[in-house]
Image (cartoon, grey):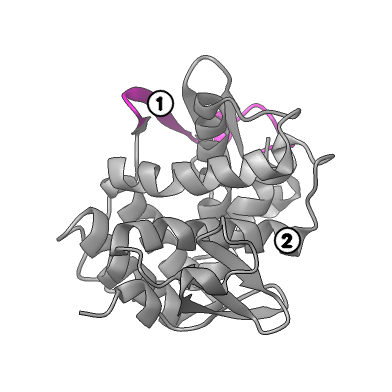
């Protein structure tokens, strides 16, 4: 059977339309690599002899790399920049590439959580209803997720917060649409970065490696959160616009 990663549709990230292409290891420009980009040909080269799980991990590395490449991040970029870039990039990936996003989540479901329904949710199947998360976990460390009514929200300049060392995320309960998906993932990434020790002084290469490693691990450990997030992105175009508090920024 063909490796399913190599059968995924092409997708766009920023100005690039990328397609995963299997190649033999001797064809890599750097023989130490098993995944690399040819930006001129808009190709993501992944070693053809990898199994499905390893090729999936390489695809995550490619997605993270392409998203930050599009954002122009470098060693001088801080943790907030890497957080916002990845959260925004994943929302855009889902919104701009419906065929890829559905196939990608169908593949992730088969790889990490058979029967989780991620593929159907990515396609906008309304017969499945995912539950808003109240907690997440990463490698045994739980993090609570609190949804606070707008009338009780005290900071007019933010929609959400991650409280360092307290393992707690606060989110404005009035969030909707793309803003809901973006802000939630943004705060979740702050939690994950803390767990991995990714901070302002971390170099670009280590951020890319860390985020590429934590994403599939987090998704596998939090199948219900991922179901909710995928559904939120799928429904975001139909959701009501965010209130005048759209002036707020993420924290």
Q: Is residue 163 visible?
A: yes
| Magenta span contains residue 41 | no
Residue 187, percent across and down? 56, 37
Q: Is residue 30 above or below residue 22?
A: above
Q: Residue at x 25, y 59 (%)?
A: 111
- Which quarter shows the N terminus? bottom left
Nearer to us in this view, 120 or 4: 4
Element carrying mark 1: strand
Residue lying at the far top of the rendered structure: 165
Residue tagged 1: 143
Q: Is residue 124 visible?
A: no
Tell me the magenta residue range.
138-158
Q: Which mark is residue 69?
A: 2
Q: Position of residue 84 (x, y in %)?
A: 67, 48
Between 153 and 56, the one lying in front of the other is 56
Q: Is residue 58 above or below residue 77?
A: below
- Tell me the residue at 31%/24% (across/down): 140
Sequence-wise, the earlier of marks 1 and 2 is 2
Question: In percent of the image, x 55 and y 69: which residue is there?
Answer: 93
Q: Disc 1 to disc 2, how far (Cα)?
A: 30 Å
In this image, 6 relative to 69: left or right? left
Spot occupied by residue 141 in the image (x, y as percentages of width and height): 36, 22
Residue under the image location 46 percent in, 64 percent down: 233
Instruction: Give whichever of 85, 182 is nearer the camera.
Output: 85
Tell me where residue 18 sits by quadrant: bottom right
């Amino acid at each position: 059977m063909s490796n399913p990663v190599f059968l995924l549709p092409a997708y766009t990230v920023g100005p690039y339309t990328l397609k995963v292409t299997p190649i033999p290891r001797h064809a890599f420009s750097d023989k130490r690599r098993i995944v690399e980009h040819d930006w001129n040909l808009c190709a993501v080269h992944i070693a053809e002899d990898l199994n499905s799980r390893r090729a999936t991990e390489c695809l995550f590395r490619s997605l993270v790399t392409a998203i930050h490449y599009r954002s122009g991040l470098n060693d001088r970029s801080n943790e907030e920049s890497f957080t916002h870039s990845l959260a925004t990039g994943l929302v855009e990936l889902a919104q701009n590439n419906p065929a890829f996003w559905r196939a990608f989540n169908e593949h992730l479901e088969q790889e990490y959580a058979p029967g989780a329904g991620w593929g159907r949710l990515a396609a906008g199947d309304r017969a499945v209803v995912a539950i808003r998360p109240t907690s997440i976990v990463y490698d045994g460390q739980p993090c609570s997720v609190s949804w606070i009514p707008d009338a009780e929200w005290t900071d007019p300049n933010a929609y959400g917060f991650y409280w360092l060392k307290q393992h707690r995320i606060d989110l404005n309960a009035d969030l909707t649409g793309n803003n809901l998906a973006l802000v939630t993932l943004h705060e979740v990434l702050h939690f994950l970065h803390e767990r991995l020790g990714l901070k302002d002084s971390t170099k670009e290469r280590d951020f890319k490696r860390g985020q590429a490693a934590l994403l599939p691990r987090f998704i596998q450990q939090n199948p219900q959160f991922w179901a909710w997030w995928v559904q939120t992105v799928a429904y975001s175009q139909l959701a009501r616009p965010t209130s005048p508090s759209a002036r707020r920024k993420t924290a």
